[in-house]
Amino acid sequence: MENQAHASSALAARLAACLGSERVLGEDGQRILLSSDLYVEGETCALAIRPADAASLAEAVKLITDAGHAICPRGGGLSYTGGYTPTDTASVVVDTRDLAGIIELDAGDMTLTAGAGTTWEAIDKALVPHGLRLPFFGTFSGRMATVGGGLSGGAVFFGSARYGTAADQVLDLEVVCADGRILRTGQAAFRNGRPFYRNHGPDLTGLFLHDGGAFGIKASATFRLIERPAHTGFLSWAFPDAMGAAAALSTIGRAGVAEEAYVFDPATTARGMAAGDLGSDLRRLHGIITGQGSITAGLKAGARVALAGRKLVPEGWHSLHLAAAGRSKAALQADLEQAGRLLGRHGGRQIPPSIPMAARAAPFDNLDGVLGPRGERWLALNAKLRHGDAAKIIAGFESLMARYRERMAATRVTHSMLLSAMNTSTFSFEAVYHWPDRWLPLHRAVASPAFLARLPPDTPNPEGAALVAELRERTLDLYDELGVASNQIGRTYRYYDNLAADTRSLLDALKSALDPRGLMNPGVLATHRR
C-alpha cells in the first residue's frame, strides 16, 4: 500500500506537469465521487484527471499506463452499470467533461464535430439557429449526458424510433488508445480525408462504439445532420394491459411514423406525476407554448395540457405516447392519422398527449430524477429484442415478479417497466427496480438542493439492496434465455460470456492489439479482467 501511494504521488506530479495542477484531482471527496455511479461504489481511484484537449489527454494516458495504473473513462457519470467505476485502487478516472465544445459545424455538408464531453443539450442549442438537428438528439438522462458517454454506452431516446441510437449517427471518431496513440476513423482517417462518410472499407468507427471505453477514450466525434423538422405533433393512447400496449407499440415502431414511441406502465405514470412541482410544470408549459410554431397553436396546446391536469391515464392502465415530426403540416398530419388508425386497431382509448408534449418541451431536464419522488433509488436493466419477442419478455418478467412479490413487499422494493420502439425492427424493454436506501455520492452531487431538501432523510436498507442485487441477476438470466441485446454494457451485462467462442477470440485479439496490458477500463465487456 505504501509503495502504491508513492507511485501515485509520483504519477500525480508527472500528470500535473502535463495537464496543469488544476486538472489533476486528488482530494478525497472528488475521487470518491468520480469513482461511483448511480448504483455502484467502485474502489476509490488513486487520482482523477480532467483534460481539456486530445493532445494532452493522449500524453496523460501514456504516463498513466506506463506507471501501471488502469484508466477508467467517465462521461456525464449517469451510469448504473459500473461502466467507469474502478475495480482497483491503482486506477485513474479520466473525467472527459472538459473535452467539450463544437469543433466544427459545416451546415453545407451537414456534419458536426464535437468534443466527447459536449452534452447533447449543447449540441442541440448550437444547431437551432441553423435550422438543423441530430437525427437522434438526446437521452432521457438529463442535461449532463455527454457525447462520449452516450457513444460508449449506447444512448437512445429522442428520435430513436425513427433514427436509431446515437451511434447510428456517427461518421468518424477521434480515439486515444492505451499507449497514447490518437486514432481517427471514418473518412477522416485517410490522407487528405475529411469527415463526411463512415464506410470506406471496414467500419472501424463501429469498433469503438458501444465498447464502454474498453478499446480507447473517445476525444471527439463527427455526426451527420438533418434539417430540423418544421412541425411536431403528439398522440397518447391508453390500454388496460401491458400486452395490448406492447402490441400497439410494435405496430407503431414497424410503421416508422414516430420519432419517439414509448409505453409507461401504471407505476411509472404514478411516479412521474408525483415527481412534478410547480417550477418544473411551468417550465414545461412554457416549452409547450413556445415550441408549437405559432403563438396561437402554442396557447391551444398549453391549454389542453393545463385542462388535462394530472389525471391523464385511467387508473391501472398502460399508456403509449408518441412524438411525430414532418417538414410540412400535411406530412405531419398524415403520420398522426396513420398512427391513430394503427393504435385504434389495438383497442384502448385516446387520451390527452400531455406526457409526450411535456417530454419534448424539456428534453434536457434537471437531474432530480436520479431519485424517486420520495427519495427512493432505482436501477434499470435494458433489453433490445425483436418486436415478435416482446410478449415473451413481458410474460417472463411478470412471472419473475410474481415469484418475488412477498419478499419485495417485505423489503420495500417495487418495480416498473418502460417499453419503447427504437426503429422498425427493434423493441426495447427496460425493467426498473425502486427501493428506499442510503444515497450514493452521485445522487447528492447531481440532484438539486431544493429537491433534496423536500425529501425524507435517506436511511440504509441493506435487505432491500441485497434483494435488488439478486433481482438484477435473475433479470439478466431472463435476458440471457431470450438472447437479447443491451446497451450500457459496463460491468453488468454478460456480453462476453454470451459470445460465441470464435467471436470471443476475435474480441480478445482486438483488445490485445489496442490495450496489450489490459489497462483501459479493465473488466468492461469482461475482457482482460485484472
Image (cartoon, rainbow, N blue to C red):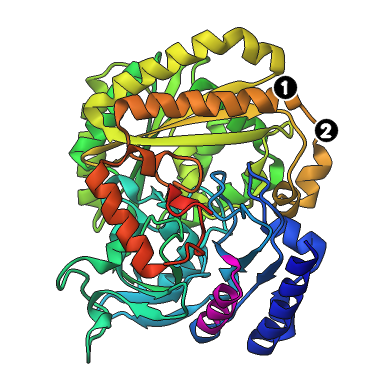
Q: Residue at x 51, y 46 (%)?
A: 491
Q: Earlier in the sequence, mark 2 or mark 1?
A: 2
Residue 242's x, y, as percent?
Answer: 39, 18
Disc 1: CA contacts within 10 A as few (<14), some (14-19) or many (>=20): some
383 falls in the magenta region:
no
Residue 426's x, y, as percent?
Answer: 26, 38
How far, Cα to Cα, is label 2 from label 1?
Answer: 19 Å
Q: Which is in the foreground here, disc 2 or disc 1?
A: 1
Highlighted magenta segment, given as a residue range: 57-70
The residue to which callout 2 is attached is 456
Residue 485's x, y, as percent?
Answer: 33, 39
Amino acid on which the number 1 mark rests in the picture: Glu
The answer to the question of whether label 2 and label 1 lie on touching residues, with beta carbons closer than 8 A, is no
Of 411 and 164, the residue lying toward us = 411
Image quarter of the N terminus = bottom right
Residue 100's x, y, as percent?
Answer: 53, 75
Q: Which mark is residue 463?
A: 1
Q: Residue at x 61, y 75 (%)?
A: 67
